Image: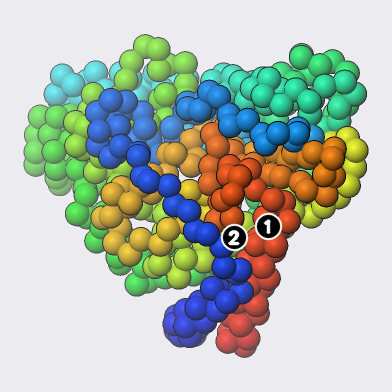
Amino acid sequence: MKRIITLLVSVACSLSLAAQAVPEVIKYVPVNTVESMLKQIQDNPCVSACNHYAYPGPRQQQLTPAPKGYEPFYLSHYARHGSRWLIGTDEYSGPYQTLLKADSLGKLTELGKQTLEKLRRLDRASHLRLGELTLLGAQQHRGIGRRMYERFPEIFSGDAKIDARSTTVFRVALSMENELQEICKRNPEVEILHDASEADMYYLNRPHAYLDTTKFRPEVSRVYAEFCKKHDTSATVLPRLFNDDNYWKDSINATKLNDQLFKVAGNLQSTELRHGFTLYDLFTPEELYQNWQKTNAWWYIAFGPSPLNQGMQPFTQHALLRNFIETADTCLVQECPPTTLRFGHEVDLLPFACLLEIGNFSKQIADLEDLDKEGWQSHLIFPMGCNVQMIFYRNPKKPNDILVKVLLNENEVTLPLPQKRAPYYKWTDFRKYYMQKLDYFEQWLQTAHRNLE
């Protein structure tokens, strides 16, 4: 571990090389018009769920028209699976059993008893379904497929072809199938190749061995633990559930139960039980905000551009970005290239969006307390069903002048490229910029490995 820490210190000094390795471009960061999370939570508690936020659909209904003479001809995307049940074996049963035991001892308030019944219903409904796609998750991908077809009919018309790949996880493959079915319903002639193979996992969902082992080094874990302690709400939430303070203080891991209840409350929106009840009545908006801060910060450290990790975690998706570029190289020379659809997970899409430097999501923010103020709100990046779409345009009169537009969750975004026709960018600018980023990472990694030898 000492060798790793020493390495990181020495390699951090080489980060200044990034500016030399990446070409100088206009760095456009849009004015942050995103409301504070507390205001958003007051209006809609569901947004506090971070990666468990159910896909809301695009905010942008009308896309910016392409420059005159340009038409879409190729689409390439990566999408997270849709809404799902929680994955861990005790994520539903754990809080349910904790309250069930307390009830047997007469330790629950009336709200505690009501919460116990809700947890019982969730535990029963999730039986043998942990991690599975929910009905809402399927509907989300059908909606995405329908809107892709409606927005870019030129790409999906006639005898169009689609090459779709998913990870080997069932909920991901089912998300792919739902999206494809929606396209097929609108054009039965479309020719589809779809697969879910280990052969594609290296770019769809493969943890990076080195970056994964260094993301929560002891000093980083200490910073995060102190941050979480500051934002712990168990002391105000649990007295609403238990009628005996000594009981929950002495017999229960209060912080763990608080965190479990917060996660289950957020996941409820992805299930059909959301029509019957909520668990957000356990928390005030301020308490939801405090819990959101802990989760948002965890994702920022683990997969975002946190300076605690020298801003390198987005490079976990170097293989995915390279696959986008190399696949485009093959497809763009074809008259009617097959649409490329990829399906995976939030642990890939979040760092991928940061690696692309979409908007200001690549911003390095030193103080975790400032994430909200700086607009780094993870639910904007990776709700259930989140997706990045790259749409390519060409002008028959200028066949070599290909433009690309990027959508995050079906909304146009800015990139760190020349802004003359934004949100449309020259493919040559795009390719040069990001290939140089990938080259820089390879050099950085080689240095890291040499220092470990």
> Residue 233 has which mark?
none
Decide which of 201, 185 is in the foreground and name it. 185
Residue positioned 48% across, 42% down in the render? 381
Which element type, helix, strand or loop, lies under badge 1?
helix
**Residue 165, image x, y percentages:** 76, 39
Decide which of 217, 408 is in the foreground and name it. 408
Image quarter of the C terminus? bottom right
Can you tell which quarter of the image residue 341 is in?
top right
Residue positioned 48% across, 53% down in the render? 28
Q: Which residue is mark 1?
A: 429
What is the C-alpha distance between the residues marked 2 and 1? 23 Å
**Residue 73, image x, y percentages:** 79, 34
Q: Is residue 157 above or below residue 348?
A: above
The amino acid type, in three-letter code, at marker 2 is Thr
Which element type, helix, strand or loop, lies under badge 2?
helix
Q: Is residue 213 above or below residue 394?
A: below
The amino acid type, in three-letter code, at marker 1 is Asp
Q: Which is more N-terminal, label 1 or label 2?
A: 2
Decide which of 102, 273 is in the foreground and name it. 273
Residue positioned 56% across, 51% down in the render? 419
Can you tell which quarter of the image residue 252 is in?
top left
> Residue 316 has which mark?
2
Q: Nearer the viewer, mark 2 or mark 1?
A: 1
Q: Residues within 10 Å of mark 1 (few under 14, many from 20)?
A: some
